[in-house]
Amino acid sequence: MAQYAVLIYAGDSAHSSDATAEDTAVHDRHAQELERSGAVVAAYALTPRDLATSVRGDAVTDGPFVDTKEIVAGFYILEAADLDEALAIARLNPACRLGGGVEVRPVAGGGFVQRPAA
């Protein structure tokens, strides 16, 4: 099966330090559904935009890399037979109904890096 990265775009991350279980409930339910489907390989929520730091050449600045209305709030890797199946799964992401959206891109390669034993 092919792997696809799903980048979640929203006004900000739902996972702020003061987020309640109610704030993240819709996202948590979606994550549980993805896990049950067996399609998800890895998933990560990112912290809010005010915790981002960007590097461009030698310049280091506070904030996301691009100053836009929406930021990357999280991402996951899923396995699907083809792009159509990956899009069908990605459309179920709550961000698509809450004013944000997702970007689906085929994964060209990679994986977890094995660390040498200490």
Image (cartoon, rainbow, N blue to C red):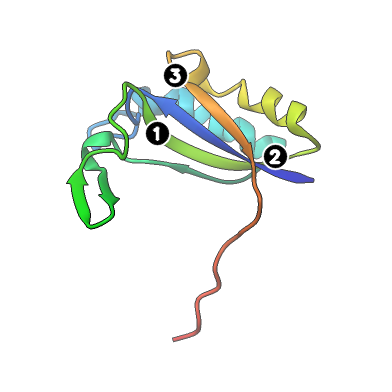
Q: Which residue is mark 3?
A: 100
Q: Earlier in the sequence, mark 1 or mark 2?
A: 2
Q: Position of residue 57 (x, y in %)?
A: 28, 55
Q: Residues within 10 Å of mark 2 (few under 14, many from 20)?
A: some
Horizontal arrangement in the rendering, residue 28 relative to residue 79 (left or right)? left
- Which residue is drawn at the image coordinates 23% and 42% (left, top)? 51
Distance, label 3 to label 1, CA atoms, is 10 Å
Q: Which residue is mark 2?
A: 39
Q: Quadrant of residue 35?
A: top right
Q: Which residue is mark 1?
A: 73
Q: Earlier in the sequence, mark 3 or mark 2?
A: 2
Q: Nearer the viewer, residue 12 or 15?
A: 12
Q: Nearer the viewer, residue 15 or 101?
A: 101
- Which residue is drawn at the image coordinates 37% and 41% (left, top)? 46
Q: Is residue 2 above or below residue 29?
A: below
Tag 1's secondary structure?
Answer: strand
Distance, label 3 to label 2, CA atoms, is 22 Å
Q: Residues within 10 Å of mark 1 (few under 14, many from 20)?
A: many
Tag 2's secondary structure?
Answer: loop
- Which residue is drawn at the image coordinates 63% and 34% (left, top)? 34
Q: Position of residue 5 (x, y in %)?
A: 59, 40
Viewer-side label of 1, 2:
1
Q: Amino acid at mark 2?
A: Ala
- Which residue is drawn at the image coordinates 47% and 27% (left, top)? 27
Q: Quadrant of residue 114?
A: bottom right
Number of callouts: 3
Q: Residues within 10 Å of mark 3 (few under 14, many from 20)?
A: some
Q: Amino acid at mark 1?
A: Ala
Q: Amino acid at mark 3?
A: Gly
